[in-house]
Image (spheres, helix red, strand yellow):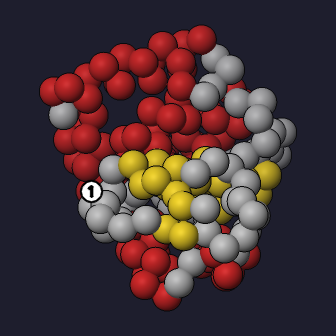
C-alpha cells in the first residue's frame, strides 16, 4: 500500500510505503502550542468520528515503527515541527490542507462552510501564506490563548495517544 502525500515541503517527492495493514486516522500536532491545543479542542467538540491525536510526533512513530523507514521518520519529524499532519486512509494532509480537511470533516455546518471557503481561496495561495505566517508566529500568538485556569479538557470524540 502507498500513501499519497498532499502538499508538503519535506515529503513532496516520494511516497510512504506502509507495511502494516493500515493506519487509523491520526492527527499529529504541536502539543506545546496553546493555539494548536485549542484547535484540537474545537475539533473534539465538532467531530463525531474517532480520530487519534498525538501531541508528539515521536509517540506516533514509536506506535507504528514498522510503517516507516528511517528516512521517512526523519522527514515526518521535521515536518511535524512546522505543521499539523493528518494521516487519513492512504493520504497525508499537511499545512493548510490538514486544516481544510479537518474543517470539512467536521459535523458543524459553520466549520464545513469555513473549510469550503478556505479551500476555494487556495486558487490565490492565500491559505498557504496565512498558514505559514501563523505557524511562524504561533508561539508569540500563544499569548492570546493564555488561560489562568489550569483545567484539564476531557475529550469526548478524539482519542489521545500520548
Of all residues, the one furthest to the bottom in this rendering is 70
Q: Nearer the viewer, residue 56 or 68?
A: 68
Q: List x then y, in percent, for residue 68.
A: 57, 78
- Relative to 48, does residue 87 appear above or below in the rendering? below
Residue 132 seen anywhere in this rendered image of the structure:
yes
Q: Residue at point 63% right, 26% down?
A: 106
Q: Residue at point 67% right, 82% down?
A: 65
Q: List x then y, in percent, for residue 7.
A: 33, 50
Q: List x then y, in percent, for residue 155.
A: 80, 44
Indicate the secondary structure of the residue bearing disc 1. helix
**Going by the image, does 158 lie left or right of 36?**
right
Q: Nearer the viewer, residue 48 or 44?
A: 48
Quadrant into which the N terminus falls: bottom right
Q: List x then y, in percent, for residue 148.
A: 60, 49
- Relative to 27, does residue 72 appear above or below in the rendering? below
Q: Which residue is mark 1?
A: 136
Residue 29 seen anywhere in this rendered image of the structure:
no
Amino acid at each position: 500500500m502507498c500513501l499519497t502525500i498532499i502538499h508538503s515541503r519535506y515529503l513532496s517527492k516520494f511516497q510512504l510505503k506502509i507495511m502494516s495493514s493500515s493506519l487509523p486516522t491520526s492527527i499529529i500536532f504541536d502539543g506545546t502550542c496553546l493555539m494548536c491545543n485549542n484547535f484540537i479542542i474545537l475539533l473534539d467538540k465538532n467531530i463525531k468520528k474517532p480520530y487519534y491525536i498525538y501531541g508528539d510526533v515521536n509517540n506516533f512513530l514509536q506506535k507504528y515503527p514498522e510503517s516507516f523507514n528511517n528516512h521517512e521518520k526523519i522527514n515526518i519529524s521535521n515536518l511535524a515541527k512546522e505543521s499539523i499532519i493528518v494521516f487519513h486512509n492512504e493520504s497525508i494532509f499537511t499545512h493548510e490542507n490538514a486544516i481544510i480537511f479537518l474543517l470539512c470533516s467536521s459535523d458543524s455546518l459553520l466549520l464545513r462552510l469555513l473549510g469550503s471557503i478556505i479551500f476555494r481561496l487556495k486558487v490565490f495561495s492565500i491559505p498557504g501564506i496565512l498558514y505559514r505566517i501563523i505557524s511562524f508566529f504561533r508561539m508569540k500568538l500563544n499569548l492570546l490563548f493564555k488561560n489562568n485556569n489550569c483545567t484539564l479538557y476531557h475529550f469526548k470524540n478524539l482519542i489521545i495517544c500520548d
